[in-house]
Amino acid sequence: MAVLLDDIVQSIELWLKLIRKPQPYVDPNLDPVLLVPGIAGSILKAVDNENGLKEERVWVRILAADYKFRTKLWSRFDPSTGRTESLDRKTSITVPQDRYGLHAIDVLDPDLIIGRDCVYYFHDMIVEMIK
């Protein structure tokens, strides 16, 4: 009876998304791989600090790219913290964490439908490693 109750509680928690369903490992004998993108090699989003719900992609984008780059991405390096700070105090720059960070380096412009293979970054390598 206790096992059945535990299964019911776990199912409700999963349904309410309080806990994540454990993901099985493909092969525990495989070594992890770290993919490190180069300069301009990942998607960047600007988050409005006053209204945290508003996110917009600022790199890589086609429409209004120059304007968004100048207003959102220009920043200065702070040597005391080792970080760059946006010149727009209301904006912070983030990298999407979808798919454990792979979304940001898989395809640089996921909105592009025609000619998408020209904006693949680590896509082919990710697909090959998943096999």
Image (spheres, rainbow, N blue to C red):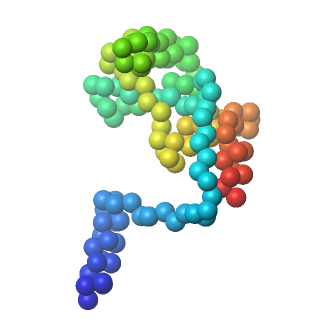
In percent of width and height, residue 49 lies at 31, 25
Q: Quadrant of the N terminus?
A: bottom left
Q: Nearer the viewer, residue 31 or 4?
A: 31
Disc count in the image? Answer: 0
Q: Residue at x 58, y 22 (%)?
A: 63
**Extreme residue in the bottom direction:** 1
Q: Quadrant of the C terminus?
A: bottom right
Q: Residue at x 33, y 78 (%)?
A: 7
In the rendered view, does 90 fall on the left or right side of 102? left
In the rendered view, does 41 fall on the left or right side of 14? right
Residue 82 in sight from this viewpoint? yes
Residue 105 to residue 18: above or below: above
Residue 121 to residue 79: above or below: below
Residue 109 in sight from this viewpoint? no
Residue 42 found in image quarter:
top right
In percent of width and height, residue 104 lies at 55, 37
In the rendered view, does 129 fall on the left or right side of 75? right
Residue 51 found in image quarter:
top left
In percent of width and height, residue 26 lies at 60, 63
In the rendered view, does 47 fall on the left or right side of 105? left
Residue 80 to residue 118: above or below: above
Q: Residue at x 55, y 42 (%)?
A: 103
Q: Residue at x 36, y 14 (%)?
A: 80
In percent of width and height, residue 58 lies at 51, 24
Q: Nearer the viewer, residue 130 or 36?
A: 36
